[in-house]
Amino acid sequence: MKEIDGVKSVFEAVLQKGSQMEAGCATFDQAGRLLTIDDSFLRLSDEEKQGFSDTKAEQYVLERSLGGTENSTKIKQVVRRWRSSKKGFIWQGHVGDKLTLSRYITSEGKTCYLKVPLENEALNDQIPSSEVLFDVIQSLDIAVALYDADLCFVLSNQKYADMIAVRQDQLRPGQPIHEIMQGLTTKNRDHCDHDAAISPARKAKKLVNKIIESITRYEKGLEVKRSDGRILLSSSHETGFGGYLVTVKDVTEQRQIEEARREADMLLHKIVEACPTNFLVSRVSDGKIIYFPPASRDRFGDIDTAKSFFIKPQDREDYLKALLPTGTLDDYRVQFRRRDGSIMQGLTSARVTDYKGEDVIVSSTRDITEQLLMQKELEEQREIAHQNEKISALGGLLAGVAHELNNPLSIVVGYALMLQDKTDDPEVKRRVDRIAIAAERCAKIVKTFLAMARQRPMQIENCNLNEAIEVAMDVAGYGLRVSGAKITLSLANDLPCVAADHDQMAQVFTNLIVNAEHALSEKGEEGELVIRSSFDELLAEVVVDVIDNGVGIPKEIQARIFEPFFTTKDVGSGTGVGLAFCHRIVDAHNGNLSFRSSLKTGTCFTVRMKASGENQINDDVLNVTEPRNLKQRVLVVDDEQGVADLISEILTEDGYQVTTVNSAKAALIELQHHSFEAVLSDVKMPGIDGTELLQRITEQFPEMASRTAFVTGDTLSTDVASFIEHSKCLHIEKPVSPRELVMLVQSLIQKNGK
């Protein structure tokens, strides 16, 4: 590489290189961003030009301009010299191409790089300096004009003539600048571009004077707006001989881009200000808030630092420990303090970025307080569903157990009651009575379980709460009796009925007794449970008190005891459903469940319900007269032979003629050959069950359909319960007593007028 001495400017360097070939030029700002470039320097696409104008690309563009045939390290060395050299130099590639490389720094601090290709013999050629200079300035992307010390024109490129709106042939050496500037003031079509001229004349003249004054003062960056909307940027530079080098750049597109950016920034600002999403920008070092949009101010109030909404200082430290290692954080659980002092549960996503040389955090927090409440409610609903599933499964188990127990219990109960009237021996009679009492107790417990487990709509009827209490004691009183606790039932005589579902009220009292059992668990024989019923004549309400002397309910949790799933019992000892269920059932009956409690004296739950004012009526069977003993024929259908024999013996002793069969198929055959006043059938049977039997009787023996009743031990089954309800047939549940069975048959026969 050969150094070129005596270079005072980029143009003089080119003159000394002596090239008649097209020169390439590229200009960069102080940050190394590309401002202008022509194809002779390096051919770039529009996308590349746009990209290089937004980023530091000076080194990369210069390396590419020297081609890709040289070793990258060598090219980097050449580019370093090119960027630092104050003089031009000649560089020769490995294929023999020679280039003169030089640079020129303008008064604005911009760097102009010039690359001129030379032929091998070009160094020895003597080319007139004026021609070389003219070629160079014509290839520049900016307008250039040279004026002498008297402001008379010396030379320019075509772009200068275009920008001041005159033809090139109107520019003559020695012409004063005032005449040249007429292109911006006159509307003479022969002299200037009519559309670019500035009017009115007074405004144009004032502008021309301003331009000339700025040139003489060597001012930089004077903005001139032509009538056609083009915007020019004029700068003046002092030459070595006292003249003026004037550069004019068309910045119309640049201003349009800047205006578009300003509008985009303004639009972005308006969008951010109106955005309902909460976010903010804060410094990492001290938490100082740099940007705080309205939505965030509404949430957190007028605060200066992000530290203000963290509950504890350690919370922010933990937050930074999670964020800073990677600079990225997503859905980080936080608790923030709102402007009203309430606590917000949130998920924060954040990014660390650089702003004016400082690390800042751009973060957005989503309030999930309501979502968590909904999730909690959903979990409670799921728990309710789970409990319902358990209850449903228990109901299925009870159905199977009840069905298996009802048949043998029917036999025990029935024969025990029959034997009571068959002996005169007091000792035998006493033993039989005990068998009958125990059997009836078993039967009552089974029926109570069935009633409690049966899932059906609420059936409002006249209900005696004393009976519901007794049922509940039979079911739930065992645990208290085993623990030695004293149980006192003080039930009022002639207690009015209430309008209620008997089974549901029995469940309410069962839950209250179980709750009392837990409260008395540590009392042993000192424990005491009192259940008292009474009638409040003033309010016309039936009142039931369930009182225990166990551990009371602490005051701090008394307000929550009726909440679903709230329990103070150990895991496995309670679900928190019982009291909530009781409260819901009593409330559904327009009643009131309340309590009073003390840690010293225990707890009293009180149920109050309006009296119905009506007497309890048994609608299951019709009023019957004394049996007429008319030898009516009865057909008994049951797959359990023992149950069929029991029913037969009971009815036979009452004067009926009984035929027993063990299948529905056999029953249909009997109906074809014999007539009967009544048919008693089980529902659950192998093969043809009671449901299909009734359907076939209706089709084949329609007169017998109304004379058919059912004796079943499986009313807990949804199918059986639905069948009994829709068929409207009389029925009784196993285990049966002789009296219930006789009354059923008498009711069935009287119903059909026999």
Image (spheres, grey):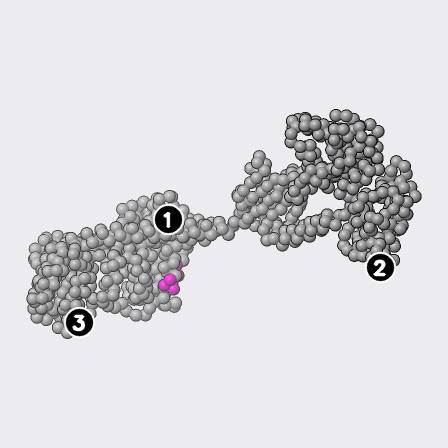
Tally of numbered discs: 3
Which of the two discs, 2 and 1, sits closer to the camera?
2
Element at badge 2?
loop
Q: Position of residue 727 (x, y in %)?
A: 22, 66
Which of the two discs, 1 and 3, sits closer to the camera?
3
Task: Give the mark nearest the N terminus, 2 or 3.
Answer: 2
Outermost residue on the bottom side: it is 753
User: Residue at position x 77%, y 30% from top?
Assistant: 122
Task: Give the mark nearest the N terminus, 1 or 3.
Answer: 1
Task: Give the mark nearest the N terminus, 2 or 1.
Answer: 2
Q: Amino acid at mark 3?
A: Lys
For the question of whether residue 211 can be seen, the reply is no
Pointer 3 residue: 751
Res 349 quadrant in image: top right
Q: Amino acid at mark 2?
A: Pro
Q: CA distance from mark 1 to mark 3?
A: 48 Å
> Dots 2 and 1: beta carbons under 8 Å?
no
Pointer 2 residue: 200
Q: Magenta part of the protein: which range?
A: 588-593
